[in-house]
Structure formats: C-alpha cells, structure tokens
Image: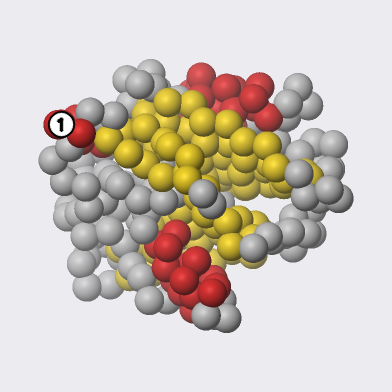
Amino acid sequence: MRKNIADLLSTNPYPGRGIIIGCSDDGKRSVIVYFIMGRSENSRNRVFERTEDGIRTAAFDPAKLTDPSLVIYHPFRRYEDTAIITNGDQTDTIFDFFKQGHSYYTALRTREFEPDAPNYTPRISGVVWPCGSYALSILKSIESSAACCQRSFFEYTGTTPGFGHFISTYETDGNPLPSFKGEPIPISITDSCGLEAFAFEVWNALDDENKVSLYAWERDFDTGDVNDLIINRH
C-alpha cells in the first residue's frame, strides 16, 4: 500500500539520509529525490553543489570542516544514460564498475556500512536505467557488529505512474541510531504540479533542526530531457 512521503517524514525527527525513486504521476518521467540531515556541526555544515556529471557535497564554511571522510562525496552521478544516487563514496565505486563493464551489484559487493561506530551507518544506493526501471540497496551492520554486513538488493522493473519507493539510513533518532529495517517503502510520487513542488513537499516535511540539503532530478523517457533542483539550508 502506497504511503504519503510527507506524512512519513513529518512524524520522523531523524531518518538521516533518504532516497526516493519512482515514476512521475503522468507516467512520462523518472523521478529521484535525495536528502541529507545532520545532528553534528560537521554534518550540518554542508551544501550541495553541481558538478559536470551530477552533484557533490561541500562544506558551507570550510573553516568548520573537521572530518571530510564521511560527509564529502558525490551523491549523484550519471554514467551514460544511467543515474546513480547514494549516501556516500560508493557512488564513485558504482560509476567506476560501470566503466569497467561490471554491474551495480558487483560494485556494492565490494563495499559495506560506514565505519562510524557505534552507529555503523548503512550505505543506501540506487540506480535508475533509461527505461525507468530502478534498483535500491542497503548495506548494513548485523546487530551493531563491525564484523558482519548484510547486503540487501531490491529491483523494480517497469514503471507505474505516480508510484515509487523510499529508503533511508535510519529508522528514526536514537543513540546509537537504529538502521532502516525491511524493504523500501512504497510511496506516491505526487508531482502533478511539477518537480519543484514535489521537492519542497519533501523538504518541508523534514525536521527543521536537522535537515541540511535536498536534490531532486527527473528525466523524460521519450526525449531524455533532464530537470533538476537543489535546496540548501545554508
């Protein structure tokens, strides 16, 4: 059963990083939304910036950047006509494996969750193919163990107008932060008023204190035309 993404997010103070992928409600476009949140000054001191083939995170105030290892990366890149969206530097891993003729799955089997004990933040990733089919995955620790990684892959073939899936790094706030559980959540893609309206619907539902940046992207199936939008707190 489809959920309303605004309802899901407005009742959750800290899903962490989130990926939404699906099909526009007119059935003509792939849609991606990615957001980041933060509790620490280092995590909140970020903005999204465009690059030649996507976007990257950057420090809003470079003087306040303390550890770039897990907060500076390329969330979104395009390899030919395939879109890659992730919450970490596994974006580059997938991109590089594509260049070598390998698959998304092979790439992620070389990676695991982030080494940020005790949270062991999951790595969430998605790819969208030109036809609109897409895949999502999550690499997470088993029972907060640094020794065991669970890799789960979810593939969705074909397109359904106004339908998509949502996955996030965390279930909600906590100490340590509880990893996302189960399968990606089926949601409605309510973009009949345009990508910007849908992006701000998601952005406005995020916790005001913790939200940092959001990126929204869409591609027309027939023409290949792309439209995107960045929203930064700073």
Q: Is residue 176 left or right of residue 92?
A: left
Q: Is residue 234 left or right of residue 108?
A: left
User: Against 161, is 183 above or below?
Assistant: below
- Identify the residue position indicated by label 1 in the image: 64
Residue 166 image position (x, y, % from top left): 56, 45
Task: Find the residue positioned furthest to the front.
Answer: 52
- Can see residue 123? yes
What amino acid is found at the position of numbered circle 1 in the picture? Lys
User: Against 5, is 153 above or below?
Assistant: below
User: Against 153, is 103 above or below?
Assistant: below
Name the residue located 35 percent from the left edge and 51 percent from the top edge. Answer: 73
Q: Residues within 10 Å of mark 1 (few under 14, many from 20)?
A: few
Name the residue located 77 percent from the left edge and 50 percent from the top edge. Answer: 224
Q: Is residue 50 left or right of residue 110?
A: right
Name the residue located 28 percent from the left edge and 72 percent from the top edge. Answer: 148
> Quadrant location of the C terminus?
top left
Residue 9 image position (x, y, % from top left): 49, 29
- Can see residue 167? no
Residues 6 and 178: in front is 6
| Dot 1: element | helix
Residue 119 image position (x, y, % from top left): 23, 51
Res 25 → quadrant:
top right
Residue 181 image position (x, y, % from top left): 44, 52
